[in-house]
Image (tube, rainbow, N blue to C red):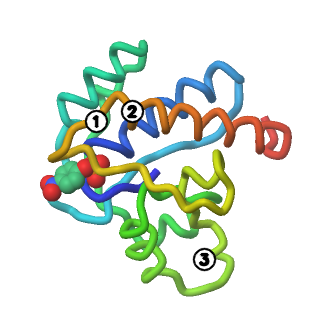
Amino acid sequence: MVCLGNICRSPLAEGIMKKKIQEHQLNWKVDSAGTAAWHAGEKPDSRSIKVAQKNNIDILNQRGRQFQARDLDDFDLVLTMDATNYQNVRYLTTSSEQENKIHLIMNFVNPGLNQQVPDPYITDGFESVFEMLELACNKIIEKYKWDIPR
Ligand code: 4NP
């Protein structure tokens, strides 16, 4: 799960997905990262912590980290929040196999629409970010839950 700062959107995506993975008893690994290193080592934004808590998801133990080129090998899917994250991750690819792993996360909800999860850091909107990510995570679970060994 990739956004810019790894303190607002992608920590929520990680938390939501981890909860669903548990509920479905899948053995998937999920992590999140930011394309920027500004918030490396920091806790998620308090507004993300709050909206997660409201939905019984604990993201307090997450810490920010910067996306690394090796993540493109270590993970099967690289799910980005907006077009800038998408481009920044794509610059790091060295093969079409890596390129094919990268998606805008909302394309799992509305294929081909290239909808973006808006950056809530300045403008707020954490509730609607949460709702978008929850929809996307549901779709991803449904799409792959039988494909990947438990
Ligand atoms: P995120 O939000 O990419 O969803 O974590 C942001 C967090 C911090 C900044 C920008 C976006 N920032 O400019 O510090």
x 27%, y 26%: residue: 49
Q: Amino acid at mark 3?
A: Glu
Mark 3 residue CB less than 8 A from any atom of ligand 1? no
Q: Amino acid at mark 1?
A: Gly
Can residue 40 be seen here?
no
Residue 10 pos. (x, y %) = 38, 45
x 24%, y 64%: residue: 36
Seen in the picture, residue 58 relative to 39 is either above or below; the reply is above
CA separation in Å, label 3 and label 2? 29 Å
Disc 3 to disc 1: CB gap under 8 Å: no
- What is the secondary structure assignment of the residue under circle 2? helix
The residue at which mark 3 appears reads as: 99
Q: Residues within 10 Å of mark 1 (few under 14, many from 20)?
A: few
Disc 3 to disc 2: CB gap under 8 Å: no
Q: Nearer the viewer, mark 3 or mark 2?
A: 2
Q: Which comes before the other along the chain, label 3 or label 2?
A: 3
Residue 96 pos. (x, y %) = 66, 83
Judge by depth and name the residue closer to the eye, 144 or 51.
Answer: 51
The residue at which mark 2 appears reads as: 128
Can residue 12 be seen here?
yes
x 53%, y 31%: residue: 134
- What is the secondary structure assignment of the residue under circle 1? loop
Q: Amino acid at mark 2?
A: Ser
The residue at which mark 1 appears reads as: 125
Disc 1 to disc 2: CB gap under 8 Å: yes
The reply, left or right, for residue 95 in relation to residue 49 is right
